[in-house]
């Protein structure tokens, strides 16, 4: 089965490799937009359509566009009248492009389709402080579209190669086979859940960014990974007949967390909080006392040594009082006197933190904001306790990431302990079923 992935937008798309295009072959390609269009947005109203399935058999819903409206109030009124929905609609697709193939210049209409195995420089984390350029390797069929002044390239590729690349980069290409397979099923589940939903008016199923699922190309793949992941081809996790939201993070720290603690959302039945171990002894790290008790516990699937990946099962960070005051300066509380956990999940993750200063107090909400506030640039997790020895604040923590769903270090630990990917998935996604969406 083929998948269309929306790669980042390029000012100019430059590629090298073995390229085949209508009318020739080339080793280098440069594509620029000549459309002169600007990118503008309006509101699109859709009504339910009885037609088709955009992607896989789960996505039975399909929408027909009723019209475009510059004003949201009008869009809401129209949507109410037709029993439909409304979405922001971005225009700027199409128009002429200039293509230079091995020095041969031509002007073509969008989309310009070519195929091959290419290398291209691509932006990672554009607009964030960590943005940088990276060389990416892609293969398949490419559709280059003028997108305003830029070029948007859509990669059409085999869905299982895509899943293998995502699994290898989200976990580690050297991770044990059964852990990689579990990661592949989670990535495929998220693909099926997301594809076709976030980009209704764009010519691809899924984007390559965080918005849908991060995809950085095929450089990470070797044939061994493709073969291993291929053994799970088509399998996804479902609950109540729907693909689940298969969350995962690096390390839970020994107890997994729930959706509501991390995202303030409704909890998912398949992602309760549980011990990342073969037995649940009833530990609860949501109180300071319970946290300190659990901090000493070593029996967890994620307390495993797997050298290419750092094990942050337990960690410690300390700051002098001066450093802490500087770091928390944006809060304006003055000299920091204490950090008080006002609310924790069972994994010990703090979702509400009270910062007590000599001028005033401030409350910080959300595990992500707390990690950003107290880390350089990020604390591994918000599951920590604070000790103050008079000179320094010492933060002792557990785990890495939000801790909801599959614990990736734990999956590696289980795989090394002889569990297969089905048993790993049963452990991390409680009560979820395995269903096959397609065969290779
Ligand atoms: Zn997206
Ligand atoms: Zn874990």
Image (cartoon, rainbow, N blue to C red):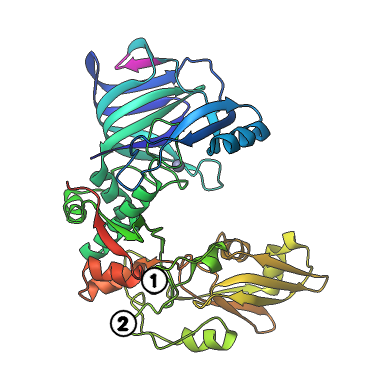
Q: Find numbered disc 2 in the image and state the secondary structure of the residue it sits on.
A: loop
Please state which of residues 70 and 389 is positioned toward the viewer in this rendering: 70
Instruction: Classify 53 as above or below 328.
Output: above
| Quarter of the rendering containing residue 256 | bottom left
Q: Which residue is mark 2?
A: 278
Q: Position of residue 50 (x, y in %)?
A: 38, 36
Q: Residue 311: which disc?
A: 1
Any part of residue 194 in sight: yes
Provide the major secondary structure of the magenta segment. Answer: strand
Please state which of residues 323 and 402 is positioned toward the viewer in this rendering: 402
Where does the N terminus fall, quadrant-wise? Answer: top left
Instruction: Classify 200 as above or below 128.
Output: above
In the displayed structure image, the side of residue 76 where residue 201 appears, left or right: left
Please give the range of residues in magenta: 98-103
Q: Find numbered disc 1 in the image and state the secondary structure of the residue it sits on.
A: loop
Q: Position of residue 112 (x, y in %)?
A: 34, 20
Q: Residue at x 70, y 83 (%)?
A: 390
Verify CB contact (< 8 Å) between mark 2 and mark 1: no
């Amino acid at each position: 089965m083929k998948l269309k992935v929306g790669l980042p937008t390029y000012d100019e798309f430059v590629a090298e490799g073995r390229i085949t295009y209508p009318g020739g072959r080339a080793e280098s390609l440069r594509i620029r937009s000549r459309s002169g269009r600007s990118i503008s947005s309006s509101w699109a109203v859709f009504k339910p359509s009885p037609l088709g399935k955009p992607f896989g058999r789960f996505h039975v819903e399909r929408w027909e566009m009723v019209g475009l409206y510059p004003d949201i109030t009008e869009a809401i009124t129209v949507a109410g009248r037709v029993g439909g929905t409304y979405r922001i609609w971005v225009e700027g697709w199409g128009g002429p492009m200039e293509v230079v193939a091995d020095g041969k210049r031509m002007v073509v209409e969008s989309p310009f389709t070519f195929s091959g195995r290419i290398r291209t420089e691509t932006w990672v984390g554009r607009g964030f402080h960590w943005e940088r350029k990276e060389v990416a390797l892609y293969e398949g069929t490419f559709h280059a579209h003028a997108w305003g002044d830029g070029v948007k390239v859509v990669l059409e590729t085999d869905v299982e190669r895509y899943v293998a690349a995502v699994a290898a980069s989200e976990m580690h290409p050297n991770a044990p086979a059964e852990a990689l397979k579990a990661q592949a099923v989670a990535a495929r589940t998220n693909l099926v859940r997301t594809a076709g939903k976030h980009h209704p008016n764009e010519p691809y199923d899924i984007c390559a960014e965080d918005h849908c699922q991060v995809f950085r190309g095929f450089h990470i793949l070797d044939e061994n990974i493709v073969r291993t992941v291929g053994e799970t081809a088509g399998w996804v996790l479902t609950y109540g007949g729907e693909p689940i939201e298969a969350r995962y993070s690096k390390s839970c720290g020994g107890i997994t967390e729930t959706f509501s603690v991390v995202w303030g959302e409704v909890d998912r039945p398949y992602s309760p909080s549980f011990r990342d171990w073969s037995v649940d002894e009833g530990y609860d790290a949501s109180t300071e006392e319970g946290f300190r008790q659990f901090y000493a516990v070593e029996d967890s699937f994620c307390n495993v040594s797997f050298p290419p990946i750092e094990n942050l099962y337990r960690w410690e960070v300390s700051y002098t009082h001066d450093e802490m005051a500087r770091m928390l300066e944006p809060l304006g509380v003055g000299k920091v006197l204490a950090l008080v956990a006002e609310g924790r999940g069972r994994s010990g993750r703090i979702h509400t933190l009270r910062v007590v200063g000599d001028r005033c107090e401030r409350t910080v909400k959300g595990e992500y904001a707390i990690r950003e506030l107290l880390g350089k640039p990020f604390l591994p997790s918000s599951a920590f306790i604070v000790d103050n020895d008079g000179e320094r604040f010492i933060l002792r923590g557990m785990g890495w990431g939000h801790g909801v769903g599959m614990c990736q270090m734990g999956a590696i630990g289980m795989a090394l302990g002889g569990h297969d990917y089905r048993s790993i998935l049963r452990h991390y996604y409680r009560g979820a079923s395995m269903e096959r969406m397609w065969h290779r």
